Every structure is written in C-alpha cells, then in structure tokens.
Image: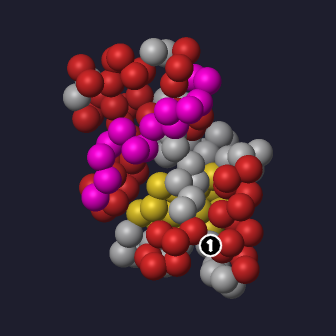
Amino acid sequence: MLFVNYPKCSTCQKARKWLSEHQLEFEDRDIKGQNPTAAELKEWHQKSGLPLKRFFNTSGILYKEMNLKEKLPAMSEEEQYGLLATDGMLVKRPIVVTGQTVLVGFKEKEWESLI
C-alpha cells in the first residue's frame, strides 16, 4: 500500500494514525518532495472511479491563486493530469493506493470498508 501525504497536513496525520492503529503496512511518500507523475495520476484516477476534480486540492491556496475553479472545466483530462503533476500542493491528500483501489482524502468509514 502506498500512502501519499503531506506530513504537515492535519488530515494526513489523522490518516497515518488510523493506518498505524489498524496495523497496516504502507510505503510513505511526501507529496511535496515526490509529486505524483501525470502517468501515476492517470492510473490512480482510472482505478479510483472518482471524478478527476476529486484529485484537486480545491481548498488549497495554489488552487485558488490559479483560479482553477474557472479554468478546469475548459481543460482536457490530459491537461489536468499535467497540471496536477507540476505541484504536489495542487493534489488532494492523502491518497492511498492499494492493489484493489485508490482512496482520495480521509473518510474513516470509507477506509474501513475498502482497506
């Protein structure tokens, strides 16, 4: 299992605690230090079954500064993958990648049923 997170994010810290409490082993990856590639994001998006917009950190400063709420609808999926790959702070976190699924954000009930 891959746990992609931003260590200073309180939601990521809660998710890490949850994984530890459930004694789940994971590979830890700092999203700021090692941003997901466009290819990884495309694979995770397809595996997750979620709308691509869910992969954007819509509450983040960078998202707002770039006015992405207005720009994203006009962009192709490939352009959006490329944009997400430019800066880890644009990506919603945490992301958990398992053999079966990809979870974006931390919702305890969802994690309990899917991990």
Residue 8 position, x and y percent, is: 77, 45
Q: Farthest residue toward the bottom?
A: 23
- Residue 103 visible in the picture: yes
Q: Is residue 22 magenta?
A: no
- Identify which residue is drawn at 73% across, 80% down: 21
Q: Position of residue 66 (x, y in %)?
A: 49, 15
Say which residue label 1 marks: 26
The boundaries of the magenta stretch are: 49-62
Q: 44 left or right of 29?
A: left
58 in relation to 34, above or below: above
Is residue 49 positioned above or below 89 on the image? below
Toward the front, the furthest residue is 109
In the picture as drawn, the residue positioned furthest to the right comes out as: 8
| Residue type pointed to by label 1 | Phe
Q: Residue 23 falls in which quadrant of the image?
A: bottom right
Query: For residue 57: magenta?
Result: yes
Q: Residue 34's spot in the image, x, y percent?
A: 60, 45
- Residue at point 32%, 24% (across, down): 72
Depth check, front residue: 31 or 105: 105
Q: How many marks?
A: 1
Badge 1: residue crowd in 10 Å (few <14, some 14–19, many ≥20):
some
Q: Residue at x 36, y 75 (%)?
A: 100
Q: Position of residue 4 (x, y in %)?
A: 58, 55
Q: Residue at x 47, y 55 (%)?
A: 104
Secondary structure under the numbered disc 1 in the rendered image: loop
**Type of colouring:** secondary structure
Q: Nearer the viewer, residue 17 or 37?
A: 17
